[in-house]
Image: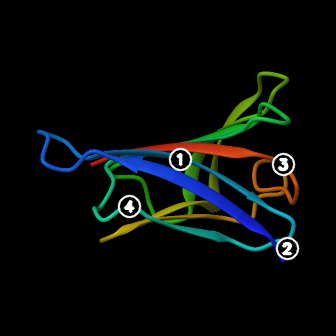
Amino acid sequence: MAIVQSQTTQPGSVTNTAIGSYLTDATAAAIVITTGFSPRYVRVCNETSGDLYEWFYGMASAEALKQVAAGTRSIITTLGITSSATGFTIGLDLDVNVINEQLSWMAIG
């Protein structure tokens, strides 16, 4: 199993921000990202397909605004983004979270 992850965090600013990327060739699973803060906004983009998620403070756990590369937008209520006190989880939606496809993400606290 190979997992490649990188991120940049800027603590101490008015808001915390973190950006990073994630690539795995392991078995498909939800991805836990640790940022060190509870995000109020998360955006995840599959760079291979162009599909993406957005999650805003106030949305329920596992919800997300999902946009596929063809342009269709919808609110999903499962397999989206779940915020935590120290980061977030990317659900196992098979359009966005795909093995061997590069994910890039941004979280703002």
Q: Is residue 47 above or below residue 84?
A: above
Numbered disc 2: secondary structure: loop
Of residue 88 and residue 3, the one placed in the foreground of this image is: 3
If you read the primary sequence from the N terminus, does the residue marked by circle 1 or circle 3 appear first? 1
Numbered disc 3: secondary structure: loop
Is 29 displayed left or right of 78 in the figure?
A: right
Crowding around mark 1 (Cα neighbors within 10 Å: few <14, some 14 to 19, many 20+) is some
Query: Could you tell me how far apart the alpha carbons at marks 3 and 2 are, in whole angstroms?
Result: 11 Å
Q: Quadrant of residue 79?
A: bottom right
Residue matched to label 4: 35
Contact between marks 3 and 4 (CB within 8 A): the answer is no
Numbered disc 4: secondary structure: loop
Numbered disc 1: secondary structure: strand
Query: Could you tell me how far apart the alpha carbons at marks 1 and 2 are, in whole angstroms?
Result: 19 Å
- At 78% across and 30% down in the image, what residue appears? 50
Q: Quadrant of residue 2?
A: bottom right
Instruction: Give percent across and percent down for residue 17.
Output: 32, 43
- At 77% across and 27% down in the image, what residue appears? 72
Q: Quadrant of residue 15?
A: top left
Crowding around mark 4 (Cα neighbors within 10 Å: few <14, some 14 to 19, many 20+) is many
Q: Quadrant of the N terminus?
A: bottom right
If you read the primary sequence from the N terminus, does the residue marked by circle 2 or circle 4 appear first? 2
Q: Is residue 13 above or below residue 84?
A: above
Residue matched to label 2: 26
Mark sitting on residue 101: 3
